[in-house]
Image (cartoon, helix red, strand yellow):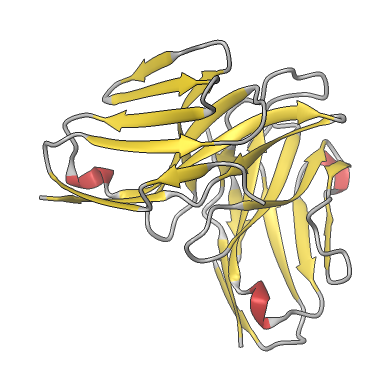
């Protein structure tokens, strides 16, 4: 089963507003990553936060990680219509000789111009 | 730098037919992944290669799915015979980490192949 669970499943905001998406997971991780997927396209990596980090910024993106609560949040500030996409959190772990990402079901963000 | 290439982009087949997908990863990327993404869900890992060896294929339905990565570069994923529930987007991804990688770095995804099984 998929480890990450995003919340909300769908989010609709006006252009210029901030968008916050949350992700919860169940087991220990090496890092957590956020990806964006535009309609009909492959996924694009947005940001990676390691298990020993609490907050990370990249442009208009801010990611937090709380390993005690096994949760993460992605904040997109000053949203644009081009931010309309599905956003997935992916938990990364290594063990038994393999290392892989496990994706959640995603949050579908609609930014209304 | 060129991204991950996949072909075909779309495929429509009838159930019980066979289908194959091709992936060319980013040059120099040792690790290659195949994911299945059903509509409305996140990608699910099917198989992971390290160079030309299989690292993890625990979620690959081996009675009908097979994959290979010859010479540690290109890869093909085959379904034989296809079922209705195989309708999905098949994504190929690659990444840089080697066999001793402690951290899982970002993965680079191709555009995917949308499979429809009728």
Q: Is residue B95 above or below residue A50?
A: below
Residue A30 shows in this picture: yes
Q: Residue furthest front?
A: A69
Residue B28 shows in this picture: no
In front here: A30 or B53? A30
Q: Residue furthest top?
A: A52
How many marks overall? 0
**Residue B2 quadrant:** top right
Percent of width and height locating residue A18? 19, 34
In front here: B111 or A98? A98
**Residue B93 quadrant:** top right
In front here: B59 or B94? B59
- In this rendering, position of residue A15 left or right of residue A6: left
Percent of width and height locating residue B56? 83, 43
What residue do we see at 36% from left, 31% from top? A74
What residue do we see at 87% from left, 30% from top? A96
Percent of width and height locating residue B104? 66, 26
**Residue B26 quadrant:** top right
Percent of width and height locating residue A31? 59, 23
What residue do we see at 35% from left, 38% from top? A21
Q: Is residue B31 above or below residue A38?
A: above
């Amino acid at each position: 089963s998929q480890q990450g669970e995003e919340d909300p499943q769908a989010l609709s905001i006006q252009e210029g507003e901030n968008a916050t998406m949350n992700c919860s997971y169940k087991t220990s991780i090496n890092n957590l990553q956020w990806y964006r997927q535009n309609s009909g396209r492959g996924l694009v990596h947005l940001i990676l936060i390691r298990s020993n980090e609490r907050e990370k910024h990249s442009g208009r993106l801010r990611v937090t990680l709380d390993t005690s609560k096994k949760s993460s949040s992605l904040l997109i500030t000053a949203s644009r219509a081009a931010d309309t996409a599905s956003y997935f959190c992916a938990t990364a772990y290594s063990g038994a000789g393999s290392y892989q990402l496990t994706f959640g079901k995603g949050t579908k963000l609609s930014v209304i111009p | 730098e060129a991204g991950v290439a996949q072909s075909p982009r779309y495929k429509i087949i009838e159930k019980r037919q066979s289908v194959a997908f091709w992936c060319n990863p980013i040059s120099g990327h040792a690790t290659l992944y195949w994911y299945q993404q059903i509509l409305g869900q996140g990608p699910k890992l099917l198989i992971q290669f390290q160079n030309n060896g299989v690292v993890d294929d625990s979620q690959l339905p081996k009675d009908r799915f097979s994959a290979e990565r010859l010479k540690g570069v290109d890869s093909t994923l085959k379904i034989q015979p296809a079922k209705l529930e195989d309708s999905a987007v098949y994504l190929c991804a690659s990444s840089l980490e080697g066999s001793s990688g402690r951290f899982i770095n970002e993965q680079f995804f191709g555009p995917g192949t949308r499979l429809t099984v009728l």
